[in-house]
Amino acid sequence: MTQALIVYASLTGNTEEIAEITAEYLEAAGVDVDIVECVQADPADFEDYDYCIVASYTYGVDGDLPDEIVDFYEELEEIDLTGKVYGVVGSGDTFYEQFCTAVDDFEQQFAKTGATKGASGVKVDLNAEEEDIENIKVFVKKMVETHESMIG
């Protein structure tokens, strides 16, 4: 059975919910999913999974990564995830000019690991509404299709 690890950082619970919605769609596609808060995870944990997913919120006016996920982010580029599929989902606030930049930052970081991008990142304004949930569903579908095309 294929396995996914979703590592998340959530302040208000919005990003945790996004991670859970992502997990539900992955499980519906037959993937075994583990969800771990970033402070309890190590980037090397991804080595044991087929799907490597980060869910992070973007903090403040400058579009910063949350403090609690910075170490994870910095260590991620040192891991070789060749043969794995990655994806990033996250929440932000369109009130700020720097909207959901954590998603972009993590996509760039994952690109350095040798993993294959499974789908374009999903950016959610605050909490997941119907349209966002549909976007997550499409994200998961593309992730699964990418993985299946890699294994033949």
Image (tube, rainbow, N blue to C red):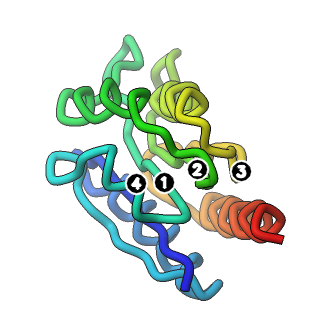
Q: Secondary structure at mark 1?
A: strand
Residue to which mark 1 is pinned: 53
**Residue drawn at x 54%, y 61% as measured from the top left:** 51
Give the mark nearest the N terminus, 4 or 2: 4
Give the mark nearest the N terminus, 3 or 1: 1
Q: Secondary structure at mark 2?
A: strand
Residue to which mark 3 is pinned: 119
Q: CA distance from mark 2 to mark 3?
A: 8 Å
Q: CA distance from mark 4 to mark 3?
A: 17 Å
Mark 1: which amino acid? Ile
Mark 3: which amino acid? Ala
Q: Secondary structure at mark 3?
A: loop
Asked whether the residues under the numbered discs 2 and 1 touch, taking CB atoms below 8 Å apart as contact, a structural biologist would say: yes
Checking the image for residue 46, the label placed there is 4
Q: CA distance from mark 2 to mark 1?
A: 6 Å
Checking the image for residue 86, the label placed there is 2
Can residue 94 be seen here? The reply is: no
Q: In the visual, does 109 lie left or right of 117?
A: left
Mark 4 vs mark 2, foreground winner is: 4
